[in-house]
Amino acid sequence: MPSCSAIGRGFGSHREQWTPRRLKAPLWFRADLGVTLNGATVSAWANQGTDAAGSLAQATADNQPTYTAVSSLGSRPALSFDTVNDVLTGSSANLAQPNFIALAVRTAADVTTGNRGVVDGAIARHYVFAQDGSWKVFAGTVAVVGAAANSANYALQCRVNGAASNARLNGSAWSGVLAVGPTALQSFQVSLVWGGPVGEVIVLDTMPSALIEDRIHAYMRVRYGLW
């Protein structure tokens, strides 16, 4: 008869479920982790990554995103931003290129006509944003990633590496080469007039292997019910 300890560990090929914590990313934010509530809004979002200076906050109640326990991102928790003045700031993280960004978000109802930044730096604005119906990356030069539809869910990955950058959306093939400029991601914040839910943000300070890229994409696809 097996011992209780053996039963607790399980048998055969059982493996612990993969999570982004294994990446040891400098910046990792997920809406069910590290959130400080001010009633229905969020006053702080603690970085789950390794950068001690990475956490975000907003002292002004009117500028705080709303916490949504069951969102349109796969019924998972999300922070919903209002397209006007909601923003979480305070991180002094400074990530030089190359860096890698992965997001799980839902666009607002006006990205085909508006300009909505989701991940940017207070020093170099508009790092990843949706504008006039397109996803774009800016690190000194603007490059178009692909189409951005109104009120749609996305898993977005960006390899930010100057003139050798590229990106992909919702399981599609990687884009051709994008020249986005050399600017570092400085004083990281979420967001610049973003509208809609943000479920998760991962930022690495190096380029992951293709295996890890695919694992992140698969994780977001399953977790947020995407494509």
Image (cartoon, rainbow, N blue to C red):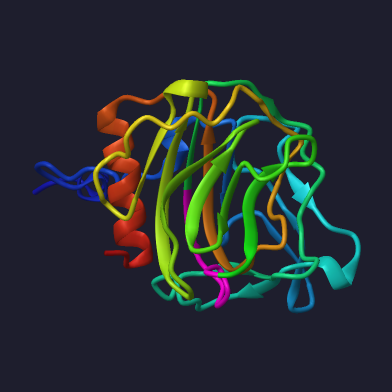
**Residue at 79%, 48% in the rendered image:** 89
Q: Where is residue 28 drawn, in percent x and y?
A: 56, 42
Determine whether 77 is above or below 161 in the image: below
**Residue at 68%, 52% in the rendered image:** 190
**Residue at 90%, 60% in the rendered image:** 59
In the image shown, does 210 or 13 lie closer to the viewer? 210
Question: Is any part of residue 124 visible from this angle?
Answer: yes
- The tally of labels here is 0
Determine whether 60 is above or below 1 in the image: below
Q: Quadrant of residue 23?
A: top left
Indicate left or right for 7 with 113 as reference. Answer: left
Determine whether 68 is above or below 6 in the image: below
Q: Is residue 56 magenta?
A: no
Q: Where is residue 155 drawn, in percent x and y?
A: 40, 55
In the image shown, does 87 or 199 lie closer to the viewer? 87
Name the image quarter holding the C terminus.
bottom left
Indicate left or right for 87 with 106 as reference. Answer: right
Q: Which residues are magenta?
A: 103-112
Q: Is residue 106 magenta?
A: yes
Determine whether 191 is above or below 214 in the image: below
Indicate left or right for 141 with 175 as reference. Answer: right
**Residue at 32%, 39% in the rendered image:** 175
Q: Where is residue 191 drawn, in percent x and y?
A: 69, 55
Q: Where is residue 99 drawn, in percent x and y?
A: 52, 27
Q: Quadrant of residue 159?
A: top left
| Residue at the extreme right | 60
Magenta span dominant secondary structure: loop
Question: Is any part of residue 206 visible from this angle?
Answer: no
